[in-house]
Image: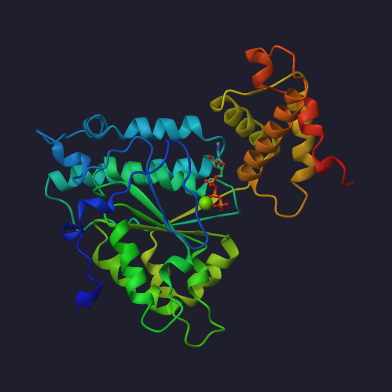
Amino acid sequence: MANPLYNIPGSSLPPSTAVAGGPSSAAPTVGASTSSVAQSPSAEATDSPAMTHAEAAPRTVAGVLAQSQVESVMDELDRDLIGLAPVKTRIRDISALLVIDRLRAQLGLAAQAPSLHMCFTGNPGTGKTTVALRMAQILHRLGYVRKGHVVSVTRDDLVGQYIGHTAPKTKEILKKAMGGVLFIDEAYYLYRPENERDYGQEAIEILLQVMENNRDDLVVILAGYKDRMDTFFQSNPGMSSRIAHHLEFPDYATDELLQIADRMLKTTHYQFGAEAREAFDAYLQRRITQPHFANARSVRNALDRARLRQASRLYVDRDRELSADDLSTIEPADILASRVFRQS
Ligand SMILES: Nc1ncnc2c1ncn2[C@@H]1O[C@H](COP(=O)(O)OP(=O)(O)OP(=O)(O)O)[C@@H](O)[C@H]1O
Ligand SMILES: [Mg+2]
């Protein structure tokens, strides 16, 4: 029998634990020691599964799709995110499984809630947090979680410094995440084998219990580098056996990074001027070989700096009347001034 202490029924939670997140499409910031709560783009903070509003239970795949409106989320995912073909395929597969599971349940064929805990592996900036937000939305629309919010945490949010501090911390986070997705970034830091009495183990044990007992209302996504995650699973077979879906996020190719840059500029009402895209391509070719390259995140940072340089360039021309074009165009000079071009 499970320790009732670890049982955190969602129904006993105050509705205020659903914290609405920032603007749509913005990924939550994963602080080093502060957890963040983000509402999936356009997900309503309702306390009931989207699917249970049904008057008549659909009997066809099309019926479930129409009622849950889950297809629009998947279409958005396809459209908004560049590349990631294997990830997108896996998400479609998982969605198909859930839709069929719904239809089975309606005919009394259901066994138990499907295990939906996942592991997202990949290098920094490959879209793990972004996809977790969409995943939460899909799970919510299909009625697998009540709220569809994502609580993003790292080790420091779960593990205390002193004896007796870890259990309350972990339970507090679990309470916040109930009804949605708990996203644990760099999950392997929970386990520190070099430290014999590390409190991380305590957090892992609580997580394991809740992942089993509350699987119908909480989905845990572990994220991090592939090799470290593999080592973590080897030492924590209990965790490994509870993760049903492993999604690998590949590094982006340069042309994908360029498309990501186009997309990011467009959503912020900027564009590359003549030859600026070529300059950015040259920038990426160099940046990609340097340390701490972080895929789409590095693209975002590079564009932020290009915007700063553009602003400085326009700023010095005090008396020039600036057109919308002037104000939204990134010129080659804004990119070529990067220190990436100064280092050989
Ligand atoms: N395929 C993509 N298409 C468009 N934008 C993307 C894509 N992948 C990531 N981005 C953007 O890049 C930024 C970083 O993505 P995200 O935070 O999801 O990556 P991550 O894998 O969680 O990174 P980290 O490991 O650093 O936390 C975000 O602003 C996101 O919108
Ligand atoms: Mg992230």
Q: Nearer the viewer, residue 96 or 325?
A: 325
Q: Look at 27% across and 54% down and name the residue there.
A: 17
- Dividing the picture into quadrants, the one containing residue 140 is top left
Q: Does any portion of residue 30 appear in the rendered image?
A: yes
- Dividing the picture into quadrants, the one containing residue 8 is bottom left
As drawn, the residue found furthest toward the right would be 344
In this rendering, would 240 be left or right of 102? right
As drawn, the residue found furthest toward the bottom would be 196
Residue 272, given in percent of the width and then of the height, sits at: 69, 23
Q: Is residue 342 above or below residue 334?
A: below
Q: Look at 72% across and 20% down and name the residue there.
A: 273
Q: How many marks?
A: 0
Q: Does any portion of residue 207 appear in the rendered image?
A: no
Q: Look at 56% across and 27% down and name the residue there.
A: 268
Residue 178, given in percent of the width and then of the height, sits at: 28, 57
Residue 33, given in percent of the width and then of the height, sits at: 49, 63
In this rendering, would 278 be left or right of 66? right
Q: Is residue 145 above or below residue 72?
A: below
In this rendering, would 198 be left or right of 82? left
Q: Nearer the viewer, residue 265 or 74?
A: 265
Q: Quadrant of the N terminus?
A: bottom left
Residue 215, given in percent of the width and then of the height, sits at: 27, 60
